[in-house]
Image (spheres, grey):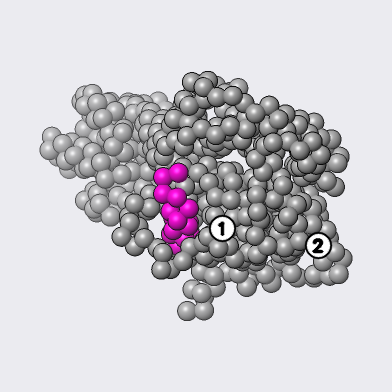
Amino acid sequence: MLGFIAQRFPLLEVLRSEFAGYSAATLRADVLAGITVAAVALPLALAFGIASGATAAAGLVTAILAGLVIGGLAGAGYQISGPTGAMSAVLIVLANRYGLGGVWVAGALAGGMILLLGIFDLGQLINFIPTAVISGFTSGIAVIIFIGQIDNLLGIQTEAAENALAKLSHYLRFDFAPNWAAVSISALVIGVMMFWPKRWQMRFPSSLAALVAATALTALFSLNIPTIGSIPQTILLDERLRLDAIPWDHLDDLLSAAFSIAALGAIESLLCGAVGSRMTGQKFTSNQELIAQGIGNLIIPFFGGVPATAAIARTSVAVKSGGKTRVVSLVHSGVLLLAALVLGPVLARVPLAALAGVLAVTAWRMNEWFEIRQIFGRRFKSAIFAFTSTLIATVALDLTQAIILGVGLSALIFVVQISRTKVQIAPVSAEIMRKQGYELRTDGNQMAVIYIIGPLFFGTVNTFNTVAAQLNGARDIILSLRIVPLLDTTGIAALEDFIERQEAVGRRVYLSGLNEPVRAYLERAGILQHLGEDRVFWSADQAIIAADRYRAGIAAAN
């Protein structure tokens, strides 16, 4: 029982390893890294709160609670969680359709789903999503984020839309007049973030510098542009999920959205963990990370926050700033809480155009440009198809449908690729057997070896059957399965039918080169028991010798 608990809830072991040898110097490094991460997280939390269809305060509350709860329970000390651009792209559509109540309920449901993934060790399913699909999904989300911020970038307000393409069609009418003050502030923020010297980034993040400059200029010149507005100086917002307000009769309508949130949260968190593990060399415990994400997302809606996930950019900042443990995440939350309690009136005056500029640059940087260059530069046709299809589906359809479509297409491509199994018939050469030290006692022309190169499954049995039908004259047939990595039930049925047809005309079938998985499957199917161990060999040569001796024995007896 204790072993089961330790396996399903490995936090104690993670903490024991993480804090071994912890010292005052390590604490100092963690505190400084936490302050740096908070400086990066503050503008992003405000921006992603609004981009999610909620408020800047909701984004700030999310970042604070995610840092405390998820960071405290995380599967590795370097993980920093909070609102993210990818998640905001899912939530804005949900908010437009169901309102904030729908966002909160779907977020809590998603938290439960992610928690179950961690408890039952199902997070490994995420590994079956190809890189090209993830890259296409990420780029599609970047497009959604950018389109969602065009209103604030231009200082206008257009009608809400069902999806990004519908929203884009509104702008193509060109029936709006940009607020040039807002456009100027957006351009300023984008310019500062794009050209901010890298050597300054760790001391004073470009996004924070851009927001400070934009807010100061807006106040100095009394620019007539929308601002964030009131920031409640609390982490328990008035607008939040309450048990008596849960729409129990409509939960089924939100399950699809909850699945999108859960899938995205799990994918992004596990990817972030993998990236952080490579950067630090520290072990990442995926099950514990999913448990942490699940618990955090179950709690956050009841404070008025939006769903959170691990954030690669903030995690990277934590590592590069010298952070060693999850104390970084806790300190970052403490600094953000202090900002909410003390700087609320100042944050309220941040222009929405400035946050839109931050999100525009973030959307551009979200794209996995290295991976995209690899896919297109090397002309991987299947990857290009999967990437492009997923990107288009992400922008045009529901994100759940985009994930399913991308994985489905990749699975189909994979099946086609591995279906290129080759089947070859080779006559037995007396000369070759002589060189190997064995003199055939019967006519080698009456033996044939069928080499199957590749998996034998539903996509390849037709190739096998076509070639096997070309057998002529052979009395003994050796099936060489050395290069067969797997079989399925269709492949088993094809082998059974082949053996039955050969035996019906007096031929004997031998098997050679079985690896352990294939041998186990043939045993379960009863094929090995039917043939007998005297017709199963490690090599085709051994099978040829056995067949030759058997035929020679029959001839001698007659």
**Over which residues does the magenta segment extend?**
96-112
**Of marks 1 and 2, which one's residue comes earlier in the chain?**
2
Q: CA distance from mark 1 to mark 2?
A: 25 Å
Quick one: label 1, few (<14), some, or many (20+) residues within 10 Å?
many
What kind of element bears circle 2? Answer: helix
Residue at x-position 15% and y-position 36%: 501
Q: What is the quadrant of the C terminus in the image? A: top left
Picture quadrant where residue 244 is located? bottom left
Residue 238: say if magenta.
no
Residue extending farthest to the left is: 504
Label 2: which residue? 31
The answer to which of 23 and 45 lies nearer the viewer is 45
Q: Would residue 170 be found to the left or right of residue 329 on screen? A: left
Residue 103: say if magenta.
yes
Secondary structure mostly seen in magenta is: helix
Q: Is residue 103 visible?
A: no
Picture quadrant where residue 514 is located? top left
Q: Measured along the vertical axis of the image, is residue 202 above or below residue 72?
A: above
Picture quadrant where residue 14 is located? bottom right
The answer to which of 334 and 280 lies nearer the viewer is 334
Label 1: which residue? 305
Percent of width and height locating residue 307: 53, 54
Q: Measured along the vertical axis of the image, is residue 62 above or below residue 224?
A: below
What kind of element bears circle 1? Answer: loop
